[in-house]
Image (cartoon, rainbow, N blue to C red):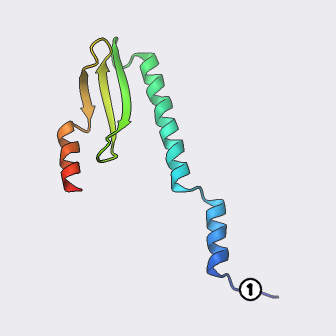
Amino acid sequence: MDIRPVNSIGANALVSASAPSPAAENDVLVRQVVSAVREVNKSELMGQGRQLTFTRDPQTRQPVIQIVDQSTGDVIDQIPPESALQLAAQLK
């Protein structure tokens, strides 16, 4: 029986071909979150006249979830709070 050694190039090619890239996994997760947010907004679970939003903080790139009053645009609640995002930005 002839067993050939696996070189690093062949092993990496196999892994990258079979495992999804982190960027592709991230895209799938983002699409799932967007879909879930739409469903929550359709069901009015946040209350009438309120909308759930999902964004990323521009400085920290952390996900931010907000409950927004649709008539005024005011943020009713936010996770994580603005103070936590500011602290994270200062620590970078």
Residue 28 coordinates in the image, percent (x, y)? 54, 43
Task: Name the quadrant containing residue 81.
Answer: top left
Residue at (19% x, 44% y) in the render: 86
Residue 66 coordinates in the image, percent (x, y)? 31, 29
Of 74 and 33, nearer the camera is 74
Task: Name the quadrant containing residue 77.
Answer: top left
Q: Is residue 28 above or below residue 39?
A: below
* Quadrant in which the C terminus is drawn: bottom left
Residue, far front: 58
Q: Is residue 31 above or below residue 16?
A: above
Of 43 and 82, nearer the camera is 82
Residue at (30% x, 24% y) in the render: 67
Mark 1, residue position: 4
Count of marks overlaid on the render: 1
Q: Is residue 36 above or below residue 5?
A: above
Task: Name the quadrant containing residue 76.
Answer: top left
Helix, strand or loop at disc 1?
loop
Residue at (18% x, 52% y) in the render: 90
74 relative position to 36: left or right: left
Residue at (52% x, 37% y) in the render: 31
* Quadrant in which the N terminus is drawn: bottom right
Amino acid type, mark 1: Arg
- The crowding category of the residue bearing disc 1, from other C-alpha atoms within 10 Å (few below 14, some 14 to 19, many at least 20), is few
2 relative position to 24: left or right: right
Residue 19 coordinates in the image, percent (x, y)? 61, 59
Residue 71 coordinates in the image, percent (x, y)? 30, 11
28 relative position to 71: left or right: right
